[in-house]
Image (cartoon, grey):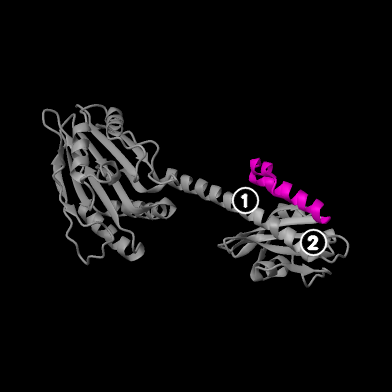
C-alpha cells in the first residue's frame, strides 16, 4: 500500500490499483471509493472493484444516509456483519449479494473527503486489524484525492481565466492593439484583467483593472466586476459615471474587494480619449515629436472603499496619429525596496513609438519582470496614420 511506484500512476489507475491490492490483502470481494461532493453534501461513487455498476451510474448518497453516509457522518469506521435492505441504500450492493461491509472515512487534515469500503459475498467478522489496514489505505486515498482535487481546481481556474482574458483583441479600424498577461501567483491566475469592446456610440471601450488578492477568488470577483462594467458601459456615455455605478456594485456585492480600474472611451474617429481612473495608475502616452509622459488624468478613489459619494472625473486627451497609449497594472512598475516613481520612470523611458507588438515586447523585456511579485496586465494601443 505504500509502494512508491504507485505514485507514478495517474489518479484513476492509482485508485484501481489500490482497490485491487486491498481486495487481495483483506480477502474481500468488493471495494469502493466514494468521494465527497462538498456543495451537494453527497458521496459519489468514483472507483470500485466488484461494484463497477455503481460507478457507471455515478451513484450518489447523502451524508448520513445508508452505510457510506453513516461512515461519513460519524467519521468513524462502521461494520455491518449482515447486510439488509434497511441498512444500505445502494441497490448495487444488494444486487451483487454483499453480505458483510466494513467502511472507513477518508480524511485530509481532519476534513472529510470521502468513504472507502470493502465487502464480502459471504458473512464475515471484520477484525480491528482489518480496520487499521483499511484506514491506512484510506490515508493514501486521501492524499491522492487531494492531489486530484487540486488538479481539477487548477484546470477550472485556468479555464475561467482564459474565458475572462481575451486571447485575441478585436480588429478595430484606425487602431492596432496588443496585450500581455503575466500571473504573479503559483495558481497561474489572479485579479488583473484587460478588456476591449465596442460601445453603441461607436466609441471603443478600453479597460484595465486589478482586484486585490491573488488566485481563484480574485479571478472570480474580477469576472463579476468585468461583466458589470460592460453592462454599465451600455447605458453610460461617460466613463466616470460608469465607474460610479460600478463602485456602488462593488461596495454592495463584493464587500472587502478593493479594485482599481482604468476605463477609457476612444472616440469613433480615434482622435481623442476620454478616460476615468479609479485608483489606477495613469497610462503612458507616447506622441511623435514629444517626450513620453503620463496621461494627465485625475486619479479618483479605488472601487470598494465605501466612500458614500466619491467624486469621479473624466479627462479628455488628444490621440494624434502615430501616438501610443500604454495601460497597465501596478505589478509592472512596483518593486520591493524601490520607490514607485523609479518604476514609472523606467516604464516611460521604455515605451517606443513602434508597432504595438514591439511596444509590449520592449516593455516586458526592459522592465525585468521575471519572476513577477504581482500579477501584470499590459495593454498597448497605437493610432494608425490616416
Residue farthest to the bottom, as pictured:
86
Q: Is residue 257 magenta?
A: no
Which numbered dot is residue 144? Answer: 1
Q: Compare marks 1 and 2 and give the one earlier in the sequence.
A: 2
* Magenta-drawn segment: 1-29
Residue farthest to the left, as pictured:
290
Of tags 1 and 2, the one toward the viewer is 1
Q: Quadrant of the C terminus?
A: top left
Q: How far apart in space, not on screen, are marks 1 and 2 (Cα)?
A: 25 Å
Residue 92 in view: no
Q: Nearer the viewer, residue 106 or 235?
A: 106
Q: Nearer the viewer, residue 308 or 190?
A: 190
Left or right of 190, for residue 268: left
Residue at (76% x, 56% y) in the render: 31
Q: Residue 51 location in percent, x, y?
A: 77, 55
Q: Residue 291 location in percent, x, y?
A: 12, 32
- Identify whether 39 is placed above or below 161: below
Left or right of 272, for residue 166: right
* Residue 267, picture quadrant: top left
- Identify whether 307 is placed above or below 46: below
Q: What residue would you read off at disc 2?
A: 93
Q: Residue 286 location in percent, x, y?
A: 17, 33
Mark 2 lies on a secondary structure that is helix
* Residue 75, picture quadrant: bottom right
Mark 1 lies on a secondary structure that is helix
Amino acid at each position: 500500500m505504500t509502494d512508491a511506484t504507485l505514485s507514478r500512476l495517474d489518479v484513476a489507475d492509482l485508485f484501481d490499483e489500490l482497490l485491487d491490492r486491498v481486495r487481495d490483502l483483506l480477502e474481500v470481494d468488493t471495494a469502493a471509493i466514494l468521494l465527497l461532493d462538498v456543495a451537494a453534501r453527497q458521496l459519489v461513487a468514483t472507483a470500485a472493484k466488484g461494484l463497477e455498476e455503481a460507478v457507471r451510474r455515478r451513484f450518489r448518497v447523502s451524508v448520513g444516509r445508508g452505510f457510506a453516509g453513516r461512515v461519513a457522518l460519524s467519521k468513524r469506521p462502521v461494520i455491518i456483519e449482515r447486510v439488509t435492505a434497511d441498512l444500505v441504500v445502494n441497490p448495487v450492493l444488494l444486487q451483487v449479494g454483499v453480505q458483510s461491509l466494513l467502511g472507513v472515512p477518508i480524511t485530509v487534515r481532519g476534513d472529510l473527503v470521502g468513504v472507502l469500503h470493502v465487502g464480502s459475498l459471504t458473512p464475515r467478522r471484520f477484525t480491528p486489524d482489518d480496520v487499521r489496514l483499511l484506514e491506512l489505505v484510506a490515508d493514501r486515498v486521501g492524499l491522492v484525492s487531494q492531489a486530484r482535487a487540486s488538479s481539477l481546481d487548477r484546470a477550472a481556474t485556468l479555464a475561467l481565466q482564459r474565458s475572462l482574458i481575451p486571447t485575441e483583441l478585436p480588429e478595430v479600424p484606425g487602431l492596432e492593439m496588443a496585450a500581455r498577461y503575466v500571473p504573479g501567483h503559483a495558481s497561474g491566475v489572479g485579479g488583473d484583467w484587460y478588456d476591449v469592446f465596442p460601445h453603441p456610440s461607436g466609441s471603443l471601450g478600453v479597460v484595465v483593472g486589478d482586484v486585490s488578492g491573488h488566485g481563484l477568488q480574485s479571478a472570480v470577483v474580477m469576472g463579476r466586476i468585468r461583466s458589470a462594467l460592460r453592462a454599465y458601459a451600455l447605458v453610460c456615455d461617460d466613463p466616470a459615471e460608469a465607474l460610479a455605478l460600478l463602485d456602488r456594485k462593488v461596495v454592495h456585492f463584493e464587500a472587502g474587494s478593493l479594485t482599481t480600474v482604468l476605463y477609457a472611451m476612444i472616440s469613433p474617429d480615434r482622435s481623442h480619449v476620454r478616460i476615468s481612473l479609479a485608483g489606477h495608475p495613469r497610462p503612458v502616452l507616447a506622441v511623435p515629436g514629444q517626450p513620453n509622459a503620463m496621461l494627465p488624468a485625475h486619479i479618483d478613489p479605488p472601487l470598494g472603499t465605501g466612500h458614500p459619494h466619491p467624486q469621479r472625473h473624466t479627462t479628455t486627451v488628444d490621440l494624434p496619429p502615430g501616438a501610443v497609449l500604454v495601460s497597465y497594472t501596478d505589478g509592472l512598475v512596483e518593486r520591493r525596496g524601490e520607490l514607485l516613481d523609479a518604476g514609472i520612470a523606467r516604464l516611460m523611458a521604455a515605451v517606443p513609438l513602434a508597432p504595438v507588438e514591439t511596444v509590449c515586447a520592449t516593455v516586458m523585456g526592459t522592465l525585468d519582470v521575471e519572476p513577477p511579485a504581482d500579477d501584470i496586465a499590459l495593454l498597448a494601443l497605437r493610432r494608425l496614420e490616416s
